[in-house]
Image: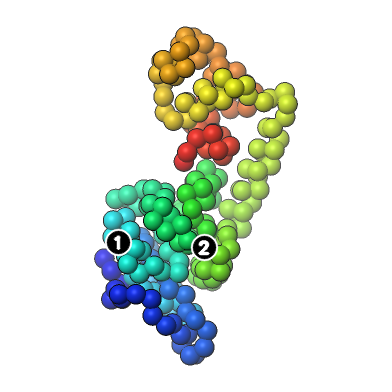
Amino acid sequence: MSSPAARPGRQPRKSRSGGAVRIQVMLVCDHRMLREALRGILEKSGDIELVAEADNGAAALKLARELVPDVVVMDIGLESMSGLELIRRMFAENPGIKVLGIATLADQCMMLQMLQSGARGYLARSAGSEELLRGIGAVAQGETYLFAEAAAALVDSLRDRSLRRTPGKALGRREREVLQLLASGKTSAQIAKTLHIATGTVDVHRRSIMRKLDLHNVADLTRYAIREGLASA
């Protein structure tokens, strides 16, 4: 769905006071109640012009391409297309696009995947209206905006990475290869075939990786690989 009528191009923008330039925002959300709540907040702001709304990925891509909004406020939990995939596709078409993602929790893995995909900011759905507007303003200025809990989670993640990077726990070349393939969803047999080694050898490498990193399942290994840039989100 598109909101305020689509325009053929960028137009001069004034605030309600007739002074500062207003921030053009596109809203992407397939949850009607949340979208209506967000719309209400944006429409009450004198510094923001809501130029379009979309309730699915295809519509969002089309509108972003046509309108080139200053900021895209996006609920990551889209059903028709992964929010992360939508961010990647928008960023591929327009590397300068500024996305403020909204998710349910301050999940480290989700936050890092969003930022790696090209998003400039991360907010929880529980954030208040003032924080939403601050986030939009910061992202519009080219800054990265994380709400307090997300920032703390990022600091914890970086600290954990630093602590894990000790000489005694460094992964060998073959272990890194096995980890990359595990994170991509391949089974031990598929990894063995790819690397031309025995399946038992893959299992030995996997146990060694888990021991060195103090991780205990494939999901944890996948999150680690994404954080370390060994696998794509």
Residue 192 image-quadrant placement: top left
Q: Is the residue 107 above or below the residue 215 in the image? A: below
Return the x and y of residue 133 as percentages of the image width and height.
Answer: 51, 71
Q: Residue at x 73, y 26 (%)?
A: 167
Separation (CA) of disc 2 from disc 1: 28 Å
Amino acid identity at mark 2: Ala
Q: Residue at x 26, y 65 (%)?
A: 1
Tell me the residue that label 2 is attached to. Answer: 127
59 sits to left or right of 98: left
> Observer-nearest residue: 108 or 54?
54
Q: Nearer the viewer, mark 2 or mark 1?
A: 1
Tell me the residue that label 1 is attached to. Answer: 62
Find residue 148 and name its label. none
Toward the left, the furthest residue is 1
Return the x and y of residue 116 as percentages of the image width and height.
Answer: 51, 47
Q: Residue at x 38, y 76 (%)?
A: 10
Q: Is residue 152 visible?
A: yes
Amino acid identity at mark 1: Lys
Q: Is the residue 55 above or below the residue 158 in the image? A: below
N-terminal of the two: label 2 or label 1?
1
Return the x and y of residue 43 as percentages of the image width and height.
Answer: 41, 77
Q: Is the residue 9 above or below the residue 151 in the image? A: below
